[in-house]
Image (cartoon, rainbow, N blue to C red):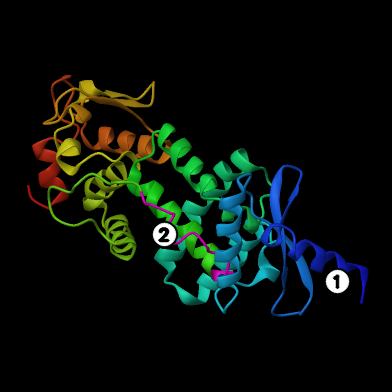
Amino acid sequence: MTDTENTTKRKSKDRDGVYRRRGYWHFDYKDPLTGKWRPKTTGQTNYNDAKQFKSAFLESLNGKYNPNNDRLKFSDAADAYIEHRRVAAGEGTLRLEKERLRAVKKLLSRIAGSDLRLKEFDDIRLIRTYQQKRIAEGVGPRTVNMEGQLMRSILKHHEQWKLDGKYEALPEPVSEVGRSLSPEEEVRLIDTAKSHPQWAVAYHATVLENETGMRGVEVRNLQLKRVDIAASEIHLQKSKTKGGVRTIPLNPDALGSVKELVIWALGANHPDHYLIPARVKAAAEGRN
């Protein structure tokens, strides 16, 4: 019997197989693929929470989780996922996911460093922190949820997703014109709008909604005096609810679309004029 096996047996008899190391509870488990014993941190400082984590982890080994992938860097895992999507997804969907991934990588690197490993996604606090910081940047909840879904897909691709029952998407504003577009429908709309210059207004209005969380009616009724391009902000002063009275920071995509809408609205130069005036709406619809 080796020293490792003796150590593992001794630890397994101590406090239900969990032991403290550097302030956190750990346990050893047998890798079902190699048959070798490996240590695993629970990421917990509370003993009962650590036992629950261990139980859930061991259950996840039954075909749902590949422990050999937990040390992958997130950036490398994401790149591998994108390579797979080149043959598994349409060109528009792939482009949209690549755009979202740039934002995901950038913020995760600031939160957890460039050496972030997939095993660190065992802790739901990482994704919750991501959601909070993304909202603080002025990004709409729909965009944050799409990015959360992308992270989930990357982890699932590498058999590392273990947050079912813990991960919660952010509440999104209720659409006043029916259900939200699916990612595939959104891609088709944007691609179609880009291919028809007369539909540019619809395209940029969609980008503005998605990137800010504004409702469609808010975009359609947005007046020039509420838009501050120099400060990259929109100041909404009218709404049916108190939550609608707010200042909305514009990220680069949203700001770019606002600038394009201003160009389309040339001739609408009074502060009370709308960003999407009637004549521009008519042009976008192909009417004289």
Q: Is residue 16 left or right of residue 21?
A: left
How far across and down, in percent of the image, does residue 168 sit?
38, 52
Dividing the picture into quarters, in which one does residue 167 lie? bottom left
Mark drawn on residue 203: none
Residue visible at 23% across and 56% down in the picture:
180
How far across and down, in percent of the image, does residue 49 sit?
56, 51
Q: Which one is nearer the viewer's eye here, 287 or 127? A: 127
Q: Which one is nearer the viewer's eye here, 113 or 198? A: 113
User: Which mark is in front, 1 or 2?
Assistant: 1
Magenta run includes residue 283: no
Where 276 falls versus 160 (above or below)?
above
Is label 2 in a helix, a strand or a loop?
loop
Q: Is residue 43 left or right of residue 13?
A: left
Q: Which residues are magenta?
A: 157-169
How far across and down, in percent of the image, does residue 45 sit?
64, 44
Residue visible at 23% across and 23% down in the picture:
226
Q: Amino acid at mark 2?
A: Gly
